Amino acid sequence: MSPSVVTLARKHPAALLLAAAVVLPLLWSLAAAAAAGLDAPAWAALAAQPQTGPALWLSLYTGLAASALALAGAALLLAHSFGTPRWTRLLGRLPAMLALPHAAFAIGLLLLISPSGWLVRTGVALVSPLNAWLGLGLPLDAPPAWQSTQDPWGLGLIAVLALKEIPFLLWTAAAQLQRPDVARRLELELRLAQSLGYSARSAWWRVAWPQLLARLQAPVLAVLAYSLTVVDVALLAGPSTPPTLAVLAWQWLQDADPARNAIGAAAAWLLAAVVAALALAGLLAQRYGRGWAADHWTRGIAPSKTIGKGLGGWACGALPLAYAAVAAALALGSVIGVWPFPDLWPQVWTRQAWHAVADSVPVVGATLALALTSSAGALLWAVAWLECAPPAWQRRLQGLMYLPLLLPSLLWSLGLHRLALAWGLDGDIKGLWLAHTLCVLPYVLLSLQGPYGGFDARLQAVAASLGHTRWVFVWRIKWPLMRAALAASFAVGFAVSVAQYLPTLYVGAGRFSTATTQAVALASGGQRSLMAAFAALQWLLPALVFGLAAWAGRERRFAPPDTGTARAATPGEELSHTLH
Amino acid sequence: MAPPYTPTVLQIRLHRLRTPAGLLLHDLELDVPGGAVHTVMGASGAGKSSLLACVCGTLDDGLQFDGTVHLHGQRIDTLSTHQRRVGLLLQDDLLFAHLSVLENLLFAVPAGPKAERQALALAALAEVELACYADANPATLSGGQRSRVALARALLARPLALMLDEPFAKLDTPLRQRMRELLFGAVAARDIAAILVTHDAADVADMQRLTQLS
């Protein structure tokens, strides 16, 4: 051991242990994933595959389009809600939207927009009387022949990803905007800009958004990486001939032939390289586009546009409405029995699917056990890290901690699988717990960093000046003050764990099923109600935990002053005390 | 005329106070007797708050204090902040938002029988004329009321010295006067050695005990 490590171990033993506990498996997984990509024949075989080019193109444009739409949607919602009651309402609805996992959202949206889904049936119900009355002869007794899901252009996939990533970007923006230091400064700057003659919205776009966007680089990159490399959502909503490159890589990795496995690993690395290239392009655009952007921000006051205003106001209500519709589709879809087209409502309702869910004790048990223990483990680690690690360590390791967010999930899962194999944890609940915890950790850390960074350090000085040690302060002041953030972080971790698909499949070696793996597996079969029931379960469990977190983090209610006349005194009244 | 002799309670011998950017303060000696308020004035960035932080032990990382601080003859600059018995009052009252007014005060009362601690906190609250706000949310109090609660809280910890970092800065003129009376009275009554940092000459309690930092 080098002397510097010995010195560090003596000075910050707890932080060193914490770092080792995460860095070791993280680096091991990365190294294992890297080793899987070092196979020249596999790269040559990947290049020779006829599907590679179209699949890569599909991944690229669906990923870019979904990310751009998600960012534009989040920006529009922020511009039209920040500083108004709408923002508070939107924040209140975010947990419920975040709790809905990607796969469940995709399944719910399919139930709505598929040719035999509710939207088409509603349309048919509305058009039918007109069709009969005018004798139009429209064929309304069979679902239309168009492909609204798994369409060859990837439009359904783009829609699912964009709608699902908007709440994530809003949440990361909220984490910044809720920091007392950032929020206060932005509010003052916005007021100042308005005092110079800019409208509230114009001030937002020119003053607040550029500053916020700079703080959202990592989340935007995470959205891009996820959209380009997601497997479960692409399986459910993406095209199949060819599928996206991530799905193709996953299929190759599932193959019994090691040579095809190697092609799959090479494809996963190709996706990682594409993400890295896009990130680099983004950085260059930011660097060299700054002059153009600054020119735009400073070109003076222009009349406010009413078109954007209406669109933004509409979007603030439409997003929660879309999520409510998807959740309703899942709930109703889970109790559908016989439902011939074009009936708007099923002829027979059945609870059979829910009976099957109730009978799937191992599935529900594994989902709950993994989510509870991995989010608790990640929360404990994150809190200990933020409390013990010197700020310089936190800065240096931040990039590594967030790497699982930025790496293609396929590559990351491959690394975790190799780690589990090497450590003898393959197909073991302990290995699965480790994999889930490592996947959950960056999200928990991300959600805690804002509140930790914004916590007023002077409170500790005050507590110490009153004679209390650091740990008394942490236990009695800091953590109680941060309980809402701590509870929300736990809920985020829980939701992330429930949504894990690839790590559960790979590290669990098929021995463990969760609500997510069940829902995705059932999507390829004909059991619509059972698929919807598992997808609804995927949403209900995190929604329940988000609800409990909101309850645990609610603001304390204080008793009113014990005299009928006592209230906050005005300066004039306080003056009377002086004359007392 | 020189002030009458009173034994020094707080003795500061500051040789150097360095920031990463360079030397902030050097060769500063302060002797503050019990019951006195020594005022420190100076331009922004002159090192006034950092001087108080040297006494409290709350210097930011990167600042290096070379010197000694003695309180009642005991060297305290080597102790942790919570062991120094140096109270702190800042421009912001920094009441703990999750605790009621009374609970904020109880946090400062040394451990002991519950009834005694409760009585001490209630008496302190009555002393600052806020007895009826015991169970109130601190956020619902006015600025002046919050300042008084913060003062009561600081005094309940029985400090031997008190560092006052612009505690009146956010109060209007009548409230400043009221708080000055309360604060200086409490310091004198409890024989506390206090250092007050301020930009307002009207806050100076004793022109004989004034240090101007440049």
Image (cartoon, coloured by chain):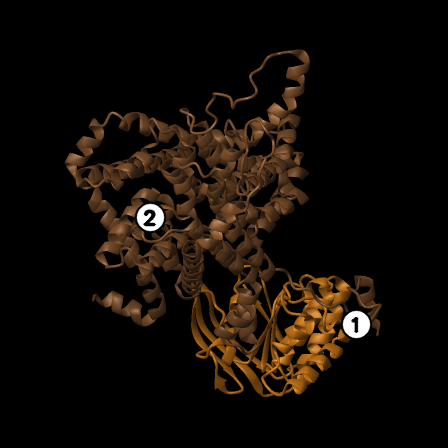
Chain colours: A brown, B orange
Q: Quadrant of residue A328?
A: top right
User: So how many labels did they put on this image?
Assistant: 2
Q: Residue at x 29, y 37 (%)?
A: A251
Point out residue B26 in the picture as x, y percentages from the top left corner.
46, 69
Quadrant where the N terminus of chain B sits is: bottom right
Q: Nearer the viewer, residue B210 or A530?
A: A530
Point out residue A480 in the picture as x, y percentages from the top left corner.
56, 66
Callout 1 amino acid: Asp
Point out residue A26 in the picture as x, y percentages from the top left corner.
30, 54
Callout 2 amino acid: Leu
Of badges 1 and 2, the one in the foreground is 2
Q: Residue at x 64, y 33 (%)?
A: A314
- Dot 2 lies on which element? helix
Q: Residue at x 43, y 36 (%)?
A: A526
- Dot 1 lies on which element? loop
Whether residue A79 is visible to the viewer of this picture, yes or no, is yes
Can you identify the residue that label 1 sits on? A562
Can you identify the residue that label 2 sits on? A505
Say if mark 1 contacts mark 2, CB within 8 Å.
no
In the rendered view, tell whether residue A291 sits above or below residue A560. above
Using the image, name the chain to which the residue with label 1 belongs: A
Q: Which mark is residue A257?
A: none
Whether residue A289 is visible to the viewer of this picture, yes or no, is no
Q: Is residue A273 left or right of residue A168?
A: left
In the rendered view, tell whether residue A90 sits above or below residue A147. below
**Sequence order check, earlier mark of 1 and 2:** 2
